[in-house]
């Protein structure tokens, strides 16, 4: 059954029109409220160092780098470039310059080990790499070498005037290869086209509310690194809308709060664990967060109880759900591609439903459902209940093997400081709120729930830990 949205269609450029995501972002920027003040408006702020980049300088640096690569290297449309660097003012410049030329950008986690980098390079097969000096040694020798983003030579390139010649980039061309977190298996390279990114950015552009005269200039804080799909997408969104994007080189919750206060942040895309932290943490009261107008939450289900606690604490901040960025294929993995894609359709792996007004509700991940006897138990439902317990700071639920039931729900719980809630008290609390087959039947206490950079729970690590504890008589 095919469900068609009840909302009006978003007007996108015709698919037959040659158009790179870089051209599209800058075309929307020229229609934005800051179009007449590009020289005065901050495009990017590094909240760790205080460095800023104006929109006019961003555009000239993208042009300069694209012109240099086009004239000084044999890099061409369809080639791949590997990027290994933490978030910085230079990283969006590199992304936009490469994609302007039709080069496929492939950013990786700077914390990747040499073996992980080797696997990523094997997937994207780059001709050139961009990295900072301390990380360049992880990258094997490539045909066109490695450009050091922290070198004087690179800074000189960005300051040279230049304009790249016309490159015909089709919307169906590959724009990026982003790497999956590997939470359910080996890391995969996710292929994203220019059209995928145009659809994402265009969607944000066309649903943004009309900005009233005298309204505060939008300032976005991206909480995930720029190599991550979340951070990568938010960079493009922010620049297309003419917002100011702030970021941290290394994220901590308190640094996030400090950044909101210092730069008067209005909007933060987050994962559910950050909503939980904002609703529960005492740190929040130390900072002036009055500029904050909205959170966009994605990456995992957000529980109703958590959302209500957040709204009670921040009544003037609107929570919205982030849309999906759809991909085209897994690079070098035809089996995973066949299992995930069917023609023009992507199997998201989500358990969801539509209501009568056309709103889509995501209940949980199908792969993460716990098979208890003949029943299926969504971990997210139990996690939402656990997070409603005042003594619980964080929690995650995993399947634990059981000879009789197949799998049983097991909870890993982080207690709040100075709280001594017991496993029996936790299991009793949950049992009163769920059907018998959903009851939590094992509890382990832990210092922190392992998560990836976007806040997604690393359940596989918890399963491995549970197995180790089980062998030690949990």
Image: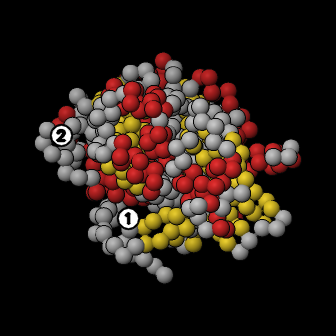
316 sits to left or right of 305: left
Q: Nearer the viewer, residue 272 or 203?
A: 272
Q: Residues within 10 Å of mark 1 (few under 14, many from 20)?
A: few
Q: Nearer the viewer, residue 93 or 377?
A: 377
**Residue at image location 48% in from the left, 24% down from the top:** 154
- Say which label, 2 or 1, has the lower sequence index: 1
Mark 2 or 1, closer to the camera: 2
Where residue 252 appears, as percent x and y from the top left, is 51, 30
245 sits to left or right of 337: left
Q: What label sits on residue 215 in the rendered view?
A: 2
- Using the image, determine if residue 133 lies above or below residue 302: above
**Residue at image location 55% in from the left, 55% down from the top:** 385
Please report contact status of discs 2 and 1: CB closer than 8 Å, yes or no.
no
- Using the image, determine if residue 384 lies above or below residue 76: below
- Using the image, determine if residue 474 lies above or below residue 112: below
Where residue 17 appears, as percent x and y from the top left, is 35, 61
Residue to which mark 1 is pinned: 15
**Label 2 SS:** loop
Residue projecting furthest to the bottom: 1
Q: What label sits on residue 110 in the rendered view?
A: none
- How many marks the image carries: the answer is 2
The reply to whether residue 149 is in sight is yes
């Amino acid at each position: 059954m095919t469900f068609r949205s009840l909302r009006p269609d978003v007007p996108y450029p015709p698919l037959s029109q040659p158009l790179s995501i870089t051209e599209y972002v800058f075309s929307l920027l020229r229609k934005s409220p800051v179009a007449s003040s590009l020289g005065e408006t901050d495009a990017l702020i590094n909240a760790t160092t205080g460095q800023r980049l104006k929109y006019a300088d961003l555009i000239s640096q993208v042009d300069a780098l694209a012109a240099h690569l086009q004239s000084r290297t044999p890099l061409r449309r369809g080639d791949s470039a590997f990027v290994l660097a933490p978030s910085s003012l230079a990283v969006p410049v590199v992304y936009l310059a490469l994609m302007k030329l039709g080069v496929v950008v492939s950013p990786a986690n700077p914390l990747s080990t040499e073996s992980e980098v080797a696997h990523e390079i094997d997937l994207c097969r780059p001709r050139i790499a961009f990295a900072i000096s301390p990380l360049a040694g992880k990258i094997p020798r490539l045909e066109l070498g490695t450009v050091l983003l922290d070198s004087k030579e690179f800074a000189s390139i960005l300051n040279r005037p230049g304009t790249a010649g016309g490159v015909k980039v089709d919307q169906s061309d590959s724009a990026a290869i982003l790497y999956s977190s590997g939470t359910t298996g080996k890391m995969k390279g996710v292929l994203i086209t220019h059209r995928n990114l145009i659809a994402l950015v265009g969607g944000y552009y066309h649903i943004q509310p009309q900005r009233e005269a005298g309204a505060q200039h939008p300032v976005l804080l991206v909480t995930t690194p720029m190599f991550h799909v979340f951070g990568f997408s938010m960079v493009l969104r922010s620049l297309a809308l003419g917002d100011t994007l702030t970021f941290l080189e290394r994220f901590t919750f308190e640094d996030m709060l400090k950044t909101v206060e210092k730069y008067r942040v209005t909007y933060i895309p987050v994962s559910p664990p950050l909503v939980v932290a904002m609703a529960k943490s005492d740190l929040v009261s130390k900072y002036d967060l009055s500029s904050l107008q909205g959170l966009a939450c994605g990456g995992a289900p957000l529980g109703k109880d958590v959302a209500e606690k957040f709204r009670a604490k921040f009544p003037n901040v609107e929570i919205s759900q982030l849309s999906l960025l759809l991909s085209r294929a897994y690079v070098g993995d035809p089996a995973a591609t066949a299992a995930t894609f069917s023609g023009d359709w992507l199997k998201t792996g989500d358990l969801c439903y539509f209501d009568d007004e056309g709103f889509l509700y995501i209940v949980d991940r199908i792969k993460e459902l716990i098979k208890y006897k003949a029943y299926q138990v969504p971990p997210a439902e139990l996690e939402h209940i656990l997070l409603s317990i005042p003594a619980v700071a964080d929690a995650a639920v995993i399947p634990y093997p059981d000879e009789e039931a197949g799998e049983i729900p097991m909870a890993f719980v982080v207690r709040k400081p100075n709280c001594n809630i017991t496993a029996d008290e936790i299991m009793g609390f949950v049992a009163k709120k769920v059907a018998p087959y959903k009851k939590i039947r094992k509890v382990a206490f832990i210092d922190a729930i392992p998560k990836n950079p976007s806040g997604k729970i690393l359940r596989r690590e918890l399963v491995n830990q549970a197995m180790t504890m089980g062998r030690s008589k949990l």
